Amino acid sequence: MKSLKIIFSIILISHFISAEQLYSDLSIQEQQRLEYLSDNIRCPKCSYGNISSSNAPISKDLKKEIAQMIKDGYTDDEIFNLLANRYGDYIILKTTPSNNKLIFILPLMIFLISIFLVTTYTIKKSK
């Protein structure tokens, strides 16, 4: 019974440890960079969310690794490139139109073509 109380108290204490306490050796700016990076990197295991919202062990390990890279002086782009080289471009959540132009242009093209086809069909039907 006593060991059960100890285990419960350890779990309770670890639950209340915040990210700032876990990464207390980082400055405020470095913690903000860590938050930005972890919000824009997908969890390799979960595939639906970022590593800051995932409880998977690999997400926690990646976050620790990113914190270490920040302390070592890596830039955000270097960290994104390292992780993309390791896990593929899928892991990066931040997308820009310059990287994926087709994703942003294709829906517009489909919309315009469908308007053209519907217009020509109704004109031919009305004659």
Image (cartoon, rainbow, N blue to C red):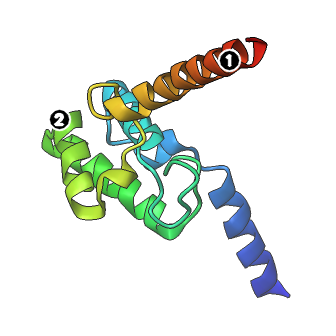
The local secondary structure at tag 1 comes to: helix
Q: Nearer the viewer, residue 40 or 11?
A: 40
Tell me which corner region of the image, top left, top right, bottom left or bottom right, holds residue 74.
top left
Residue 77, percent across and down? Answer: 20, 36
Residue 95: tell me if it is visible.
Answer: no
Quadrant containing the N terminus is bottom right
- Is residue 96 shown left or right of residue 2? left
Residue 86, percent across and down? Answer: 24, 63
Disc 1 and disc 2: Cα gap in Å? 59 Å
The numbered disc on residue 124 is 1
Looking at marks 1 and 2 on the same chain, the residue that comes earlier in the sequence is marked by 2
Residue bearing mark 2: 75
Residue mark closest to the camera, 1 vs 2: 1
The local secondary structure at tag 2 comes to: loop
Q: In the rendered image of this protein, does residue 25 appear above or below residue 88? A: above
- Is residue 100 shown left or right of residue 75? right
Tell me which corner region of the image, top left, top right, bottom left or bottom right, holds residue 94.
top left
